Image: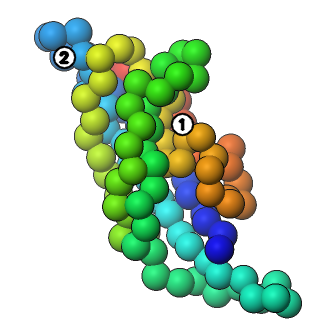
Amino acid sequence: TLYDNRAVSARAKALPDGHYAVTLKVAARKRKADGLGNEKDVALDDWIDIGVLDADGKPLYLEKRRIAADTAEFTIDVAAKPARAGIDPLNELIDRTPRDNTVAVDVE
């Protein structure tokens, strides 16, 4: 099983209580390969980590969320300033391009 997970965008808005509301858009695809390397798309209905990281790469939020469509959007409340956010941010799944799993958070 191979994944094509990608963080599309991440925006954060500072809240009055010092927290940040992070809006994260992600894209995901799942493929199966046979013994000869032939691949085909399969239905995606998986629990995949969604995360928000601080400037040191430590998780401010990390939780498995059900992904059952090619695209998804999440709004997450975190207690500190976010730096990066994405899908499978710790690269636990076999992904073709793991570098695009997270993106920099645009803080307003």
Looking at the image, can residue 90 be seen?
A: yes
Q: Are marks 2 and 1 in contact (CB under 8 Å)?
A: no
Tell me the amino acid under the disc marked 1: Val
Query: Which image quadrant: the C terminus?
Result: top left
- Classify 97 as above or below 52: below
Residue 57 position by quadrant: top right
Q: How is the image coloured?
A: rainbow
* In the image, farthest residue toward the left: 16
At x 42%, y 37%, the residue is 62
At x 53%, y 70%, the residue is 29
Query: Which image quadrant: the N terminus?
Result: bottom right
- Give percent across and percent down for residue 13: 27, 23
Query: Which numbered dot is residue 55?
Result: none
Q: Which residue lies under the disc numbered 2?
A: 15
- Give percent across and percent down for residue 92: 62, 50
At x 14%, y 11%, the residue is 16
Looking at the image, can residue 83 be seen?
A: no
Q: Which residue lies under the disc numbered 1?
A: 103
Q: Between disc 2 and disc 1, whose residue precedes?
A: 2
Tell me the amino acid under the disc marked 2: Leu
Residue 15 position by quadrant: top left
Describe the element under mark 1 as helix, strand or loop: strand
At x 35%, y 14%, the residue is 80
